[in-house]
Amino acid sequence: MRNKKSTYSTSDIEQSKKSNSENIADDSADDIVDKEEESLELEKVEEKENTVMDNNTETSLTTLSEQSQINDLTNLEIQDIEGIGPTTAKKLREAGIFSVMDLAVAAVEDLAVDINASKESAASFIMAAQKLLRESDVLEKEFITADTALKKRRSLLRCSTGSSMLDDLFLGGIETQAVTELYGEFGSGKSQICHTMCITAGQPVESGGLNSGIIYIDTEGTFRPERLEQISSSRNVDPVRALQNVAVCKVYNSAHLELIVKNLGKYIDDYKAKLVVVDSIISLHRAEFSGRGTLADRQQRLNSIMHKLLRISEIYNVAIIVTNQVQSAPDTFFGDPTKPTGGNVIGHASTYRVYLRKSGENRIAKMIDSPYHPYSEVRFTINEKGTDNLDEGKKSKKE
Ligand code: GTP
Ligand code: MG
């Protein structure tokens, strides 16, 4: 099944946002998650998934020109994989796995269920697919020398957020090969950053873009095509071409989101995407799995989605942005009494975690978790251009 670029009806667009009170009602459930998370079965799942992850953490950082090689490889037949015969290949195809790349990013647990095989067999198929990609130089070999690692790292792509001040927080823009989580309260600018990046990502690399298509997975009904039109016009970008670059998928329930993420590799190829937005990652699961008895299931599902996104970002060399809501943390005595929802599952799988908050008319973004960025904060604003730099004149008058 291939995704179609969806067009929004006015009623879709006008669908109202979740009320803040609903978020607060869910907070108690999330508190339970935080406290019980460690004891849940999910750790076992995480461990198993990490075993598979370890095999592809050192993936190659490719340039745009190298991407065509990846696209060729995604067309490799799964029967080319060592140990996979016609019967298994048929089962895999029936489970929606058509290419080596699809298999390489599959999750062990899901695959075992989908093809009715043991987890050991599923894991061995995934590893065989990864081995083939490694042999084809799409995935990095297990060991590379540090100078090669540095060279590869320098070739990763960065996409401008639309505000150079905000880009500074990311040391030059949001990276490919990573999952960046934006969390903050309602109106803090999460969706506005995502909208703005729908325009910036389509721009040439020299202008801070990714010269690519964009996939926007909208779980809250807050995607606004007319806002993209406004942002592109204000930035002197042709709105017609800019909007044609953005493939939007409105997702209605958690199972639908899981299916879209499962097939994301194919959509990335179809739309030549280098940026994938999931706005938001948690709202559907939060709404559907609210009872205490369902929390373990919810966390396992979110964990699986997040790890799949991370693998996809590395293998396809795409930037993935997920947005997350906040809940109040009543046990906080100092500082901001809010924290991201979803327990540790989202935070552990995100490469970068950024907290957004309102400050009068402006917004503040703070790096909360990153392997190498300073934990600094920057200010930016939201205007007709989407996310934008503060007007320095106004800023100094206010401060
Ligand atoms: P939730 O999805 O509700 O959790 O919030 P969010 O963090 O996604 O908020 P969002 O990015 O939608 O930001 C909403 C804010 O952006 C509004 O309160 C406005 O301040 C601003 N904004 C939204 N649309 C426009 C616009 O067309 N023009 C301008 N100037 N500002 C806008
Ligand atoms: Mg939003």
Image (cartoon, rainbow, N blue to C red):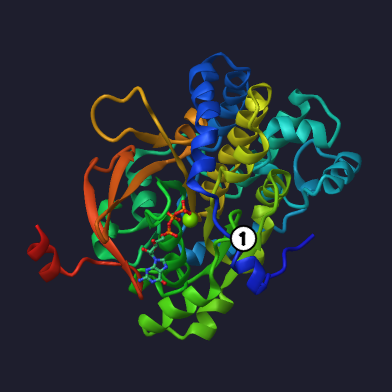
Return the residue found at the far front: 21
Residue 202 visible in the picture: yes
Q: Amino acid at mark 1?
A: Ile
* Rendered view: 52 above or below 32: below
Which quarter of the figure has residue 338?
A: top left
Q: Is residue 148 above or below residue 13?
A: above
Find disc 1 in the rendering and name its residue.
268
Q: Where is residue 201? Give x, y as percent.
A: 45, 68
Q: Quadrant of residue 49?
A: top right
Name the residue at 37% across, 46% down. Answer: 148
Q: Left or right: 392 with respect to 193?
A: left
Closest to the observer, 11 or 39? 11
Identify whether 348 is placed above or below 154.
Answer: above
> Total of numbered circles in the picture?
1
Residue appearing at x 75%, y 43% in the figure: 81
Q: Is ligand 2 less than 8 Å from the beta carbon at label 1?
A: no
Q: Residue furthest top?
A: 39
Percent position of residue 171, x then y: 27, 53
| Residues packed near mark 1 inside 10 Å, few (<14), some (14 to 19) or many (20 plus) | many
Q: Quadrant of the N terminus?
A: bottom right
Relative to 98, 394 lies left or right:
left
Along the viewing direction, whichever of 339 and 389 lies nearer the viewer: 339
Position above or below: 378 against 297: below
Along the horizontal axis of the image, is 323 left or right of 207? right
Q: Residue furthest right?
A: 87
Quadrant containing the C terminus in the rendered view: bottom left
Q: Is residue 155 visible in this depiction of the protein?
A: no
The percent position of residue 309, horizontal first and vertical second, equals: 57, 45
Q: Secondary structure at mark 1?
A: helix
Q: Nearer the viewer, residue 191 or 398?
A: 398
The picture places residue 326, in percent across and down from the top left corner, at 43, 40
